[in-house]
Amino acid sequence: MSGEYIIKADNIRKYFGGVKALDGVNLDIRKGEIHCLAGENGCGKSTIINIISGFYTPDTGTIEIDGKTYDRMTPQLAIANGIQVIYQDLSLFPNLTVRENLALNMEVAAGRKIVSKKRMQQIAEAAVAKLGLDIDLDETVENLTFGTRQMIAISRALLNDAKLIIMDEPTTAITKREVKTLFKLIKQLQSQGIAILFVSHKLDEVFEIAERFTIFRNGKNVATGSTKELDQDKFTYYMTGREIVTHRFEYTQKDAPTVLEVRNLSLANGFKDISFALKKGEIVGITGLLGSGRTELAETLFGYHTADSGEIFIEGKKAEIHSIKDGIRNGIGYLPSDRVTEGLFLSQPISDNISIERWNDYANALGAIDRNKIDEMSHHWVKELSIAAHDINNNVGTLSGGNQQKCVLAKWLALDLKILILNGPTVGVDIGAKFDIYELVKKLAQQGLTVIIISDDLPEVLTNCNRVMVMQSGRLAATLSTQGLEENRLAELAN
């Protein structure tokens, strides 16, 4: 019955320049339910969101809201029907206060030419009261954590009498603790009769928060139903179209030489008195809460920071690492947590991003770079890492998140590395690409590369590492073998 649903998108097709983004998809969301829309990057999730919210017009199909059918939506019509979208960037003004971010839209929508501080205060207070939030309304948004900004975006959505809130990958940039807070809030919204469309490709989140699911693949419906009928294997197969089996990494080179040794390393406001040793071919995880010092440690090993005290030894020799050049010269590569701003030049060709650390090797005495050698090397790594690139001269920003991550890996693998540090290697990467990266890392370790994985994704650490180091408040709290280690035990130590 149509009255059971807040929205029904039926037989939606959408083309962009002859490319079919959506091929007759359906999406039905019941009133007051939490529904997960899943699929790999490029499957059509963003396109259907933009059609429901009125930013795109479908080429064919209809949208039914509360029993009324529309051939197309507009943003104004969507809002009038209680549809609100919270995008990944949250669409907040970072330089404005919480109050201004909450009230400005309503002031503009009302067509007011003079802004009243008193009225804005009343609007903002009403917004945060809906969720029982304790937030300083005078605080500038850019000074708040991403999780707190998310709460502000949700509060703003509720000002417009939302009946359906669409959350696009809401957990990508927040901590585990903030995820718990978000899920509690989503349940609270549901208790008020508000439906949630939760867009994600994270299996554990789908099981934890959603009652029903819909999965897209290549612009088509693949499956929909109750999450009670879903398990990990089915979910993965629906998402990728292939059977994926993961095995825990086993380290068998017990007599291998030590590659990296750290003795009493300290960095002010980062970490203190850290000591450990890694053997050739090991994959060792470092986990801990945000602010535990894990990233600062990685950046110090690579040369972003210079340690205040302590020593670093590589293959038994003391290494002086005071800059990134020193890190690279000592055979260390680093994949940063934010590949977009720190790991890649998005507007530059794939070939240049892969080869950039080798340009000096490919330049003649006058500084001219041999493009043939760059192209040859780039083609090699595109093939070796199965990077889905039609043309290496295309900008790297045209690739999916997983393929961008592979390009950063290729950049470092093109060098003669001894140690590769991966900080959040699969953040924002879909299931298929995540599995490919895991298999690649294990293969590299078996070939003798020593790998450090920094992650708060505990299944990621347990599956891919033979040991894990837990950091708390800048100190090394525990070092454990992952053999037989359960996720609950690791979570206790990490928190």
Image (cartoon, grey):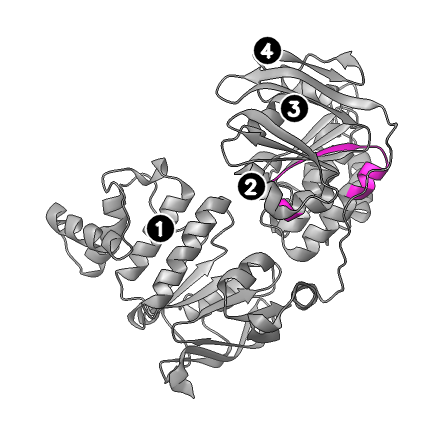
Determine which residue is flagged by label 3. Answer: 302
Count neighbours of disc 2 (C-alpha within 10 A) and say few if under 14, some if 14 to 19, many if 20 or more.
few
**Residue 253 x %, y %:** 87, 33
For the residues marked 2 and 4, what is the alpha-carbon distance in whole angstroms? 30 Å
For the residues marked 2 and 1, what is the alpha-carbon distance in whole angstroms? 27 Å
Question: SS for tag 2?
Answer: helix
Q: Amino acid at mark 4?
A: Ser
Query: Closer to the observer: label 3 or label 2?
Result: 2
Camera-side residue of 493 and 456: 493
* Residue shown at 15% from the left, 56% from the top: 112
**Residue 430 x %, y %:** 63, 55
* Residue shown at 33% from the left, 45% from the top: 93
Determine which residue is flagged by label 4. Answer: 309
For the residues marked 4 and 3, what is the alpha-carbon distance in whole angstroms? 15 Å
Question: SS for tag 1?
Answer: helix
Count neighbours of disc 3 (C-alpha within 10 A) and say few if under 14, some if 14 to 19, many if 20 or more.
many
For marks 1 and 4, the one nearer the N-term is 1
Q: Amino acid at mark 2?
A: Glu
Q: Amino acid at mark 3?
A: Phe
**Residue 318 x %, y %:** 74, 11
Q: Is residue 376 visible?
A: no
Determine which residue is flagged by label 1. Answer: 151
